[in-house]
Image (cartoon, rainbow, N blue to C red):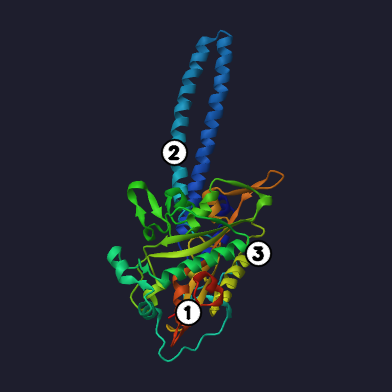
Amino acid sequence: MLTVQFIRDNKQEVLDRLSIKNFSNNALIEEVLQLDESRRVTQKDHDDILAETNALAREIGLLFKSGKAAEADSLKARNADLKEQAKQLAGQLEELKSSLQNKLVEIPNLPHTSVPRGRTPADNLIVHEEGVIPALYAEAVPHWDLITRYDLIDFDLGNKVTGAGFPFYTGKGARIQRALINFFLDEAIAAGYREVQPPLLVNEASAYGTGQLPDKEGQMYACGLDSLYLIPTAEVPVTNMFRDVILAEEKLPVKTAAYSNCFRREAGSWGKHVRGLNRLHQFDKVEIVQVAHPDSSYAVLEQMREHVTGLLRKLELPFRTVKLCGGDMSFTSALTYDFEVFSAAQQLWLEVSSVSNFEGFQANRMKLRIKDKAGNIQTAHTLNGSALALPRILAALLENNQTAHGINIPKALQAYTGFDVID
């Protein structure tokens, strides 16, 4: 969340940078500034009246001590009127603060100055590409045919038990899932991340803290009776570990990794780009999260980007990294890199990871702060990344490594799967 002081002090910069995200609701910015001005005026009036009542209380006490009861009673009536005014102003002040807060959370994060302008993924900037796109044998098929041929995933059974987008992984398909999860976690631990296993449900405060509420409320599965939400990513519970926390500057960065199921209501559209594993309502992912000092958060972002790069190299997948344009960025992000792998049978680039710096946007909402040795306090920066999301990784692995005799397993995974080929 942007602070009202920053908006007030940098109004034109806020408008200019938000325009990169194609945000055109300038009236909202004006409304925030007007509410803030009303809040400040009301706060001053309230404070002035409280100061006057305190001064009158002292004067009344002195008058009573001096035996001037009549004068004291006259001032008591005046003080009672002032207290009633203060009470009314306090109510107005709370309403203004609430209205201001509700408007502030509608404003997206400012994009970093390096974010390119654009409206769609076609406007994203490719910043890196590596790996050899495999030449498949003549009878190669997409992964949705491979999983049926080798009995790896059962979509029909998932549809029967739950609904579309909730598959059963079976046999070697389940073992590959477990192998990928363990591989990604081990790599994160080796890179200095502390593993946690978070809850799969979060409360409203947590969803609000990382920006899912109110922006993405319709995309989450809600447990209405308990006001809980199934997590769309482990980012939500892991980042909220630090809500209302002040961290010592010398302990930064704080690095946390977590595996979780992820739940998303997005229905998608028809077509091969959402077939099979390309889009699911429930999927598995390993998430890496860092809390960093504002001075070093972009260096941390590059380290996280390199970590994901290393995973894709070890999986021997052709991939590219793109810097998202303003129109393709999330509400909360200041800068995002997406990683895409090439799925040879589909002839598609599939997104498998986003690595983002949120700067102080989430931390302001969560009141996550850092303190230096001199006792100075400032807002922390938060970052996260998928390292990695499994469905499209598995789709690319199956398609790119298929042969006439089976599907080869990358060397980095063989110690985890216990087999080197699916046949």
The amino acid beneath tag 2 is Gln
**Numbered disc 2: secondary structure:** helix
- Residue indicated by mark 3: 299
Q: Say if residue 355 shows up in the picture.
A: no
Identify the image quadrant of residue 190. bottom right
The residue furthest left is 160
Q: Badge 3 local density, few (<14 within 10 Å), some, or many (20+)?
A: few
Q: Say if residue 147 shows up in the picture.
A: yes
Up the image or down, 316 lies above or below 295; here it is below
The spot of residue 90 in percent (x, y) is 47, 35
**Numbered disc 1: secondary structure:** strand
From the viewer's side, name the closer residue of 145 and 96. Answer: 145
Question: Residue at horizontal 66%, vertical 60%?
Answer: 296
Q: What is the CA distance from the residue labelled 2 to the residue labelled 1?
A: 69 Å
Which of the two discs, 2 and 1, labels the residue nearer the N terminus? 2
Q: Which mark is residue 92?
A: 2
Question: Residue at horizontal 54%, vertical 80%?
Answer: 318
From the viewer's side, name the closer residue of 408 and 382. Answer: 408
Work out which quarter of the rendered image holds the C terminus and state it: bottom left
- Residue indicated by mark 1: 421
Q: Badge 2 local density, few (<14 within 10 Å), some, or many (20+)?
A: some
The residue furthest bottom is 138
Which of the two discs, 3 and 1, labels the residue nearer the N terminus? 3
From the viewer's side, name the closer residue of 97 and 356. Answer: 356
**Numbered disc 3: secondary structure:** helix
State yes or no: discs 3 and 2 in contact (Cβ < 8 Å).
no
